[in-house]
Amino acid sequence: MGRFYITTPIFYVNGDPHLGTAYAVILADAIARWHRLLGEEVLFVTGTDEHGLKIAQSAARHGVTPQEWVDRTATEFQRAWDSLDVSYDDFVRTTQPRHHETVQAFLGGIYERGDIYLGTYEGLYCVRCEAYYQPDELEDGTRCPVHHVACEHMHEENYFFRLSRYQEPLLAYYAGHPDAIVPETRRNEVLRFIEGGLSDISITRTSIDWGVRVPWDPRHVFYVWYDALINYLTVLDYGRDPERMAAWWPSVHHLLGKDILRFHAVWWPAMCMAAGIDPPRRLIVTGWLLNEGEKMSKSLANQIDPLAVARTLGPDALRHYLVRSSAIGPDWDVSLEALVMLYNAELANGLGNLVARIVALILQRAEATAPSAPPEPPAPLELVQALEEARVGWERWRPNDAIDAAIGLVHRLNAYLEATEPWRLPRSSPEVRAVLGAAREGARIAALLLSPAVPRGAERALQALGFANAGPLAWTPDQPSTRLERSDPIYPRADFELLREGLA
């Protein structure tokens, strides 16, 4: 099988993880888990962005050095993702020596090729975004369109990257790779921006010293965005291990929010071209999670604490809601009430109830011995269709459709039990064992299809059904026999009022 390399944005360590950051990392984790199910070799990377002006300012407000501040907050991100069952393979911190080495090698090579030069920059800058804006991009010509605060006027000596040189190469690349940005609406947005003309961009700062030093001019540090983007190469040992780069870079997929699209779809691929490597294979662009119409962010104080939800209902409840509720791309409003309703309907009453029902029937009608599945899946389960719908959903970056296919199989399994009525068939008869064997095997596959979103519950379902391992994502009639025992509910029903009180 092939390789699949997926990354999240690396997250600013100037506050705690919130639902927006959890959405990105859970979504990437679900995608990574699906590709592992397919048998592919997967590299899943996340991390923290630890340089820049607002990090230095946050450290000063807390009375610690920038390094002390990022050591503390980066640890909180790692703990958060671990508690949400995020199966990352590498966690990049931009203060790591390996990252400094990669940044200096990558940008140093571009400088030697003549695409970086010294100049002076003057313009409006949003500290919270760590980004410069043109007046026509701002509210009333002065306020950041994301954070709605006044931008600061900056004037300093900078090194510039010759982005203007890459307008036509970028257009040619996207013409030859029409699926490089998904969804298509974001691709069209990028093309319109490039066609409007590209200006050279500032990539260093002299007004701060918290960052990666410019190797050819130590008075400068690299502007935080260009430092951060290069993390995708740090884990591949760029400049140190050409074989690792060659093995993984062609399969890279960046998952990112729409607010950082230009950095990833214009600046970053142009820099890759300048460094002599291919642009990233694909950009998967998400919309924003909204709370009453506003983007969730630390600065707007409209967050939902993902860790509090996970502590109350378990991580699967949050993961299922975030993966299940929307296709990748559109903005969507989140709601704790909707989360609880979905949890009860599809996890507690869905997968959890199905598994409990099958186990109880095997205990009652098959002398507690799990029967093997028949050679072929019963037609009413529409198993081939479910597997294909799930595959297409993940392939088309519609995880909600993939999970819908799994939930559809859960519903058909319940309907199959109602239609065959195994509780009316003779105990331990071939007929009852065939029905329960089919139901058990179908539930195994349903659990596997749901496992990218709900890994903890899927594992518990497989254990309750007596499967020693997950097995293949295909109908497998020759499973070894095993005795089953009663177990606690996989997903106890949740009460919205109790959840709300617990989060208050």
Image (tube, helix red, strand yellow):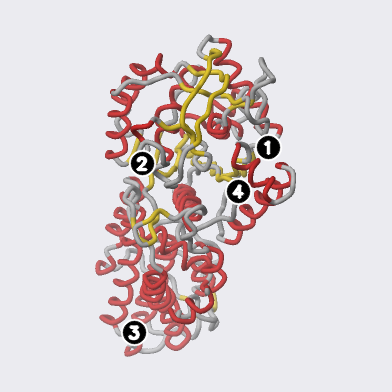
Which residue does the numbered mark 2 point to in the structure image?
A: 139
- Which mark is nearer the camera, 1 or 3? 1
In the rendered image of this protein, does residue 350 appear above or below residue 422? above
The foreground one among 454 and 113 is: 113
Task: State the image coordinates of residue 393 (x, y, percent, origin top left).
Answer: 32, 51
Marks 1/4: CA–CA distance: 14 Å
| Pick the front one: 133 or 258 | 133
Element on which disc 2 rests:
loop
Dot in front, 1 or 4: 4
- List the residue tagged with mark 1: 95
Element class at badge 1: loop
Name the residue rendered at 64%, 57% in the picture.
79
Residue linked to disc 4: 14
Point out the frontmost of discs 2 and 3: 2
- The first of marks 1 and 3 along the sequence is 1
How many marks can you see? 4
Residue type, numbered disc 2: Glu
Q: Earlier in the sequence, mark 2 or mark 1?
A: 1
Tag shown at residue 422:
3
Q: Residue at x 54, y 81 (%)?
A: 488
Q: Position of residue 7 (x, y in %)?
A: 50, 41
In three-dimensional space, the C-alpha distance between marks 2 and 1, rounded to whole angstroms, equals: 34 Å
Above or below, comparing residue 315 to residue 35 in the picture: below
Distance of mark 2 from mark 3, alpha carbons?
Answer: 66 Å
Disc 2 crowd, CA 10 A, few/some/many (<14, 14-19, 20+): some
Picture residue at 60% right of the left edge, 23% below the top = 242
Rounded to the nearest whole Å, what is the CA distance between mark 3 and mark 4?
58 Å
Q: Secondary structure at mark 3?
A: helix
CA gap between label 2 and label 4 equals 25 Å
Query: In front of the other: label 3 or label 4?
Result: 4
* Mark nearer the N terminus (1 vs 4): 4
